[in-house]
Image: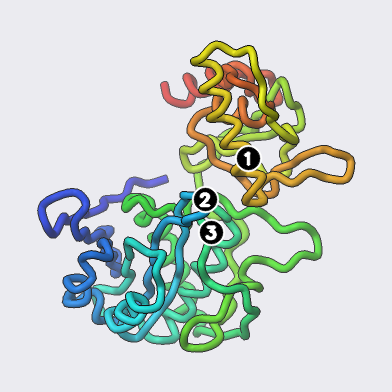
Amino acid sequence: MAGKQVRLFLVDGKVGGLTTAEIMTWTGQLLKGARKDLARIRERREAQKTGVYILLGEDEETGKTKAYVGQSDNVAKRLSTHDQNKDFWSEVVVITSKDSNLTSAHVRWLESKLIGMAKAIGRVPLENGNEPTGGADLPEADASDMEEFVRQLEILLPVLGVDVLRGRATRPAAGAPSAAQTAPAGPDGPVPVVESEPEPEVEVSPVFHLVQMPGAQAQVIDGEFTVLAGSEVAAEMPDRSGYKASSAKQYKVRQSQHCDLVADGSIAVGPDGTARLTRDVVFGSPSAAGAVIAGRVSMNGRINWLTEDNVTYAFWESGSTS
């Protein structure tokens, strides 16, 4: 994949303040800021245009990030409304165009596209509703331009720490509606349905399986160790005693991770008692992944995740980075 020149500008001269982001030769522009700076965000030209926005905040029940995707002919005015009627958000990313060529039709298309992709990836839960929507259409040339616009967002949003589009879409079971088909209605009425492309442009590794749990598969996707949907996983991690203090603490961490995955539906137990992942799940390391998947206190994932040719993750990594 060719390199990209990304330009970040810290408006306040410090991390945590208003930040603008753009890619050279791309017409899009992003503005990220905290809710406490909403008055300043509304005054900026980027926010006074037709565009899409992503509200970000913490889910009080899980402590994890959740998001809301919306669009408006004047993003600044819409954000003022959300300041009054949506409590959860603490940050916002405004997505507009430097040349002001994004129309209402473009941003409605883009809103639906981003909602569909975010739901299919399943990495960040959405606050948007689940009502089915009608369809819409863009001229062929415009649709092609907007697909390219989305590809640039897939690169730029993670640079700003926004992982809504990061990862790979989890394919629904046969006969199930796609995430795009179940995209919700927006504040201005039905959001047009836009199908995501079948394969996002992400870097992937060979598939690894876990020695202790052969039904578990993982890949490095877009630089992150990801256990794949459909992988077998320990059905539970019950309380255990007899560990030394350090091991007991580590087991509690893994147990908590496992419980969170069960609670949010990422782990589902079938009638036969076998548990499987319902979506791709990102872990901080192959060892963390192995411990949670196998229900253990710890594991050296670098030697226990193997390719179909029995190459260890550690050996593969050394070859891919040398």
Q: Name the element at disc 1.
A: helix
Identify the residue at the far left of this view: 13
| In front of the other: 64 or 210 | 64
Identify the residue at the far right of this view: 272
Mark positioned earlier in the residue sequence (3 or 2): 2
Query: Which quadrant would residue 175 be assigned to in this image?
Result: bottom right
Mark 3 burial class by Cα count in 10 Å: few <14, some 14-19, many 20+: some
Q: Residue at x 63, y 78 (%)?
A: 131
Q: Residue at x 31, y 69 (%)?
A: 94
Query: What's under tag 3, amino acid-wise?
Result: Pro
The residue that label 3 is drawn on is 125
Of labels 3 and 1, the one closer to you: 1
> If the image is split into quadrants, where does the C terminus sit?
top left
The residue that label 1 is drawn on is 259
The residue that label 2 is drawn on is 62
Rounded to the nearest angstrom, the CA distance separating label 3 from label 2 is 11 Å
